Every structure is written in C-alpha cells, then in structure tokens.
Amino acid sequence: MSRHFASLAYTPRVRDCQRRYAGHDLGAGLAEAPPAAVTALGPREQAFIAERDSFYLATVGETGWPHVQHRGGPPGFLQVVDATTLAFADYSGNRQYVSLGNLAGNDRAALILVDYPNQRRLKILARVEVLDSAAVDGKFLEKLKNPEARIERILRLRVAAYDWNCSQHITPRYTADEWRERTV
C-alpha cells in the first residue's frame, strides 16, 4: 500500500479498528511524513487498467449514503491519459444518473478494478470531472469512442492514490473468451 493511499484511507477511526482487531496500527508514522499530493500510476498499474473491460465506481450522495455502479466496455475503455489521469466515455444507460448527481456535489470517487482469472485487484481514489463531449478534443474523443453507442459525456479522473488489494478471497471468474482460450 502506498503511504498516500494509507494517509487518505487510514482515518483515526480506521486506525482504532486496526489496533482493536488486528493488534497493531497500520497507519503508524503517517503523520510524520506527509505524502505527495498526487500519486503517479506506474507501468504495472497502467497496463492493468488498459486490460480491464469493467470496473466498479463508488460515489457518495448528499444523504451520506454510498452508491456503487458497474461500468463496462471493451478492454481499455478506461483510458490512461497520463500517469495521474484516467478517462472514460459515459453512454446512455438506465437514465438514473445517480453517480453523476453524486459527483455534482462531491467529486471524490473510488474505483475497484478486478482481474478475476489472475486474482488481482487495484483500488483507486480519484477526483472526477464531468465533461460535455462537445467540449473534448476530437482526437481524444475518437480514442474513447465505441462505434455501437453515442457518447453523452466524458468522465476525467485525477488519481489521488491507489493500492493493490489483497487477492486472497477473489474467486476466479472467466469471460466466455477467456474460458475458450483456456480450454482450447
């Protein structure tokens, strides 16, 4: 876990629980060495993100309740713009707009990306900016396009921190294509 992720996630109450249930304080020493404001994604993280065909997006609404939304598309639909920025095209869905409404009041989000066959999981904390597709550079918009759907907006994510999470309880699952590749 990066020190920056721990500094954001290990609040005083979390650290109290760590001491109570695990017998030690995993956040000890965080206050003495403040982390950098932005954490850059390394080559390992960038490659992992580029291979994913889905992720889970968590936001928090005005009532304080979290909301988790599944996002999916072809592998690489979540684009690595640079080492601190991700983006994806937002298409018409169920027309509830819960994530968008939540982001309008609180731009913080959490993403969980899972590689089920290889039992790997990456957590990302980010600040999200919602952009009208008409305001986005045409070349960049082309990279995000799915020929089968009309882009309604772009979500640009500024990475605050990330963490490779424990893989112990990830049940291997396979897409139809992955299953075919393993059984041929």
Image: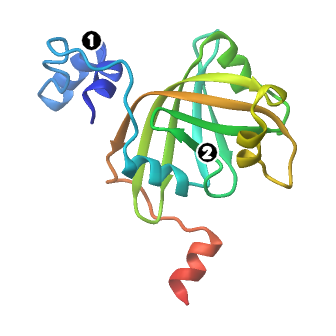
- Residue type of the residue flagged with mark 2: Leu
List the residue tagged with mark 2: 78
Q: Give residue 161's position: percent from left, percent from top.
A: 39, 29
Q: Up-down: is 113 above or below 4?
A: below
Q: CA distance from mark 2 to mark 1?
A: 33 Å
Q: On the rendered structure, is 87 left or right of 163?
A: right
Q: Pick whichever, 47 or 62, lies toward us.
A: 47
Q: On the rendered structure, is 30 left or right of 106?
A: left
Residue 12 disc label: 1
Q: Give residue 163's position: percent from left, percent from top.
A: 35, 38
Q: Pick whichever, 32 or 119, lies toward us.
A: 32
Residue at 59%, 35% in the rendered image: 57
Give the image quarter of residue 179.
bottom right
Q: Pick whichever, 20 or 144, lies toward us.
A: 144
User: Looking at the image, which residue sits at the far bottom?
Assistant: 184
Element under label 2?
A: loop
Mark 2 surroundings within 10 Å by alpha-carbon count, few (fewer than 14), some (14 through 19), many (20 or more): many
Q: On the rendered structure, is 131 left or right of 43?
A: right
